[in-house]
Amino acid sequence: MLLLPAFAQEQPYTIDDIYALPDGEHAELIDGQIFYMAPPNRLHQEISFALSRKIADYIDEKHGSCSCKVYVAPFAVFLNADDRTYVEPDISVICDKDKLTENGCSGAPDWIIEIISPSNPERDYIQKLSLYKAACVREYWIVDPQENRVVVYNLEQDRFQMKAYTFQDQIRSNIFSGLCIDFTSFHL
């Protein structure tokens, strides 16, 4: 999603500022700074739907042995115990039901997938990677339709692991060893 920085102010923004946004306005709050998000394009939506469907189908096939849930944006994720960071990942997978609240997810999802918008890839590749790693997200995928690339970060091990794939590859999830996503099946 496109993220645009808000106008600077002396005091950092808080979650109250996010809740005060007009209906239909979407933004994320990272370290007290607001980033407005433009609506996603058609390709972004197709990828998001295909990925979330594959993950949800895998979870459903586990017939209750997997307590994980899949949520698509807009879905509120409160990563930290403060009111200065609020994100809406394109796809969030949460396996600890105690993190789920009426307002979204309180704490780090197990798996986050962000789909890059052409105008601001740095936010997902740099700022959010650092943010998600610090919050103890276990797995982070960056899907880049313009480059036909998927970068997979395994963040739950002591040693940081990153692998890059193309849309011609089958990609295995780190947190679900039986889940392999074949991007060629998406017919993008």
Image (cartoon, rainbow, N blue to C red):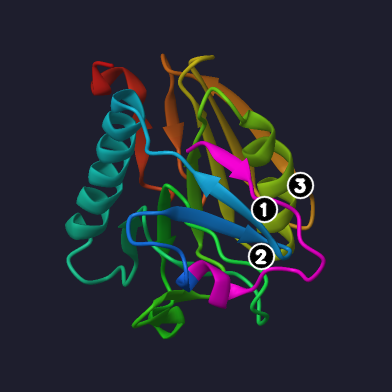
Residue 4 sits above or below residue 24 on the image: above
> For mark 3, what is the residue?
160
Q: Secondary structure at mark 1?
A: loop
Locate residue 156: give its quadrant: bottom right
Residue drawn at 27 percent across, 30 percent down: 46
> For mark 2, what is the residue?
136
Residue 8 sits above or below residue 181 on the image: below
Q: Which dot, 3 or 2, sits closer to the camera?
A: 2
Q: Is residue 83 magenta?
A: no
- Give how far across and how far down residue 23 sits, in percent: 33, 61
Residue drawn at 36 percent across, 56 percent down: 74
Amino acid at pointer 1: Leu
Disc 3 to disc 1, how far (Cα)?
6 Å
Do tag 2 and tag 1 residues touch (Cβ < 8 Å)?
A: yes
Amino acid at pointer 3: Phe
Q: Which residues are magenta?
A: 1-18
Horizontal arrangement in the rendering, residue 61 relative to residue 52 (left or right):
left
> For mark 1, what is the residue?
155
Question: Dot 2: few (<14), some (14–19), or many (≥20) neighbours within 10 Å?
Answer: some
